[in-house]
Image: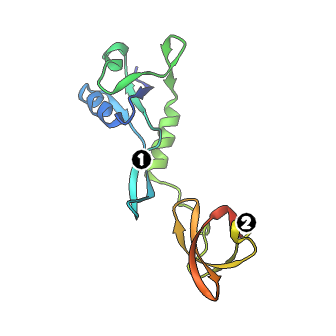
Amino acid sequence: MKRWYLLYCKRGEQARAKMHLENQGLECYYPEVEIEKILRGKRQKVKEPLFPSYVFVHFDYEQGPSFTTVRSTRGVVDFIRFGAHPQEVDPALIDELEKLATHPEEPETDALPKQGEEIRVTGGQFAGIDAIFQEADGEARSIMLVKMINRPVQVSIDNKDLDI
């Protein structure tokens, strides 16, 4: 009977391990998420592993391949074990992960204010000042317009210091 197992892979070699495992006729699941990152000064959407260095594999060790064959696959370090035996993964977990991958939850659109909205800065060096929201600056900071010497100046402020 086929069962799900979790493999620990060499750093950055999950895709290689998945390819070699699939060449052996095994079903693999390697969940990825699409995130926004600022790379070389530009905002880009990139896919990253949900669980870095881990790959789920579905096979019947009694019919083959054996645990040793799977563990010896290029890019694989070992099974996640509980004692001496590889730990089985509940199939419901895989189903739930696949469901979330096909129907991702929409991120909160109200998490950050709209461009041009006035916000009170509650902490940091600009505490107590009203600023105008310009845009998000990564995940934890925002670009704000702060009036200094009768001129608006763009500054990057930590989101936890904003009264959102």
Name the residue located 36 percent from the left edge and 19 percent from the top edge: 71
Q: Position of residue 112 (x, y in %)?
A: 60, 69
Most foreground residue, 45 or 21: 45
Residue at mark 2 to residue at mark 1: CA–CA distance = 33 Å
- Disc 2 residue type (three-letter): Gly
Report whether residue 52 is seen: yes
Mark 2 or 1, closer to the camera = 2
Secondary element at tag 1: strand
Residue 60, placed above or below residue 30:
above
Q: In x, y percent, where is residue 27?
A: 34, 31
Colouring: rainbow
Residue 85, above or below 118: above
Numbered circle sitting on residue 26 = none
Quadrant in the picture for the C terminus: bottom right
Viewer-proximal residue among 10 and 47: 10
Residue indicated by mark 1: 48
Location of mark 2 (residue) = 123
33, above or below 29, in the image: below
Q: Return the residue found at the far top.
A: 84
Q: Is residue 131 rendered to the left or right of residue 3?
A: right
Q: Quadrant of residue 151?
A: bottom right
Left or right of 103 on screen, residue 120: right
* Mark 2 closeness class: few <14, some 14–19, many ≥20 residues within 10 Å: some
Q: Estimate how packed mark 1 is, as few (under 14), some (14 to 19) or many (20 or more) residues with alpha carbons within 10 Å.
A: few
Is 85 situated above or below 10? above
Quarter of the picture containing the N terminus is top left
